[in-house]
């Protein structure tokens, strides 16, 4: 099993959050020790989720809000980079948007699992069967999160190229975005092909999660677009 106790104890699953936080959470989770019995883990998971129900639901609500803000960010980036290469900018936005439906599905799976733990669903099932179903839902949520992280890395590749060729953002940030995206993709591929090696690979690629996106965000916030570069935004899009 690749679910971590902290994932449920703190109710801070980040799939619906920013893609940075979500990817970090997906790959720094510590595997459960094989010696822990499955039924014991299910019981602990249910108790901690119920004890932290408000925090759990608040986290989901905040993740949804952040997802909406992320949509706004993607639209902004598309408008910013379409003058560099409109087709590639559209491709970049499409890759980012692909992961959003999976994020909302994940929120639904976690809410359903919580309701099962509380006894509001599957009442005709035995306790053991209900726990099995709810834990499976959480595992599906975790696994799909690991897989969709590939898209979080893939969309940074065209974005890195657009930044590099833009002329109004330092080229080094484009190169760093390439490395950032490759880090996400390597982690996701490792989860698919060599899951046992994921903890070791995560330690290696973990620093790459921050070297591209965060510097770009800070640069746009602090430095901004050079005043001598005129954005060609159509009146209809203004």
Image (cartoon, rainbow, N blue to C red):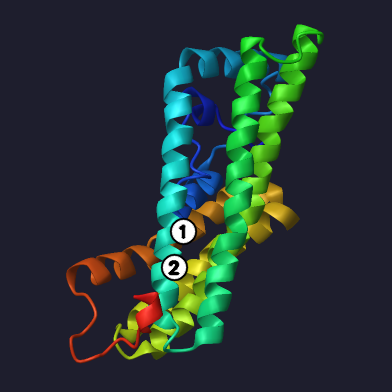
Residue 10 seen in the figure = no
Q: Which residue is more in the foreground, 11 or 230?
A: 230
Q: Quadrant of residue 70?
A: bottom left
The quadrant of the image that shows the N terminus is: top right
The crowd level at tag 2 (other Cα within 10 Å; few <14, some 14-19, many 20+) is: some
Secondary structure at badge 2 equals: helix
Residue 52 on image: x %, y %? 46, 18
Residue 227 on image: x %, y %? 18, 86
Work out whether 219 lies above or below 130.
below
Q: Residue at x 65, y 33 (%)?
A: 109
Residue 186 on image: x %, y %? 60, 63
Work out whether 46 lies above or below 182.
above
Residue 173 on image: x %, y %? 35, 77
Q: Residue at x 42, y 29 (%)?
A: 58
Q: Which residue is more in the foreground, 31 or 165?
A: 165
Q: Residue at x 32, y 91 (%)?
A: 167
Residue under label 1, please give it: 71
Work out whether 235 lies above or below 93.
below
The quadrant of the image that shows the C terminus is: bottom left
Secondary structure at badge 1 equals: helix
Residue under label 2, please give it: 75
Relative to 163, 139 lies left or right: right
Most extreme residue toward the front, as rendered? 236
Q: Label 2 to label 1, Cα distance in Å?
A: 6 Å
Q: Residue at x 48, y 34 (%)?
A: 60
Pointer 2 with pointer 1, Cβ within 8 A:
yes
Work out whether 209 lies above or below 87.
above
């Amino acid at each position: 099993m690749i679910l971590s106790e902290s994932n449920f104890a703190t109710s801070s699953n980040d799939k619906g959050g920013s893609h940075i936080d979500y990817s970090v959470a997906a790959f720094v989770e510590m595997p459960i020790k094989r010696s822990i019995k499955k039924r014991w883990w299910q019981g602990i998971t249910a108790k901690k989720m119920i004890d932290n129900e408000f925090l759990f639901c608040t986290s989901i609500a905040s993740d949804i809000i952040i997802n909406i803000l992320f949509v706004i960010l993607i639209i902004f980036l598309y408008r910013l980079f379409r003058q560099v290469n409109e087709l590639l900018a559209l491709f970049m936005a499409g890759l980012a948007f692909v992961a959003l439906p999976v994020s909302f599905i994940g929120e639904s799976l976690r809410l359903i699992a919580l309701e099962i733990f509380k006894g509001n669903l599957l009442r005709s099932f035995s306790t053991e069967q209900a726990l099995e179903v709810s834990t499976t839902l959480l595992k599906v949520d975790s696994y799909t999160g690991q897989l969709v992280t590939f898209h979080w890395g893939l969309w940074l590749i065209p974005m890195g190229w657009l930044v590099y060729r833009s002329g109004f953002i330092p080229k080094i940030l484009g190169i760093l975005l390439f490395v950032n995206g490759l880090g996400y993709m390597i982690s996701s591929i490792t989860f698919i092909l060599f899951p046992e090696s994921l903890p070791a690979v995560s330690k290696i690629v973990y620093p790459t999660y921050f070297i591209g996106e965060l510097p770009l965000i800070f640069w746009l916030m602090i430095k901004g677009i050079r005043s001598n570069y005129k954005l060609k935004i159509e009146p209809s899009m203004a």
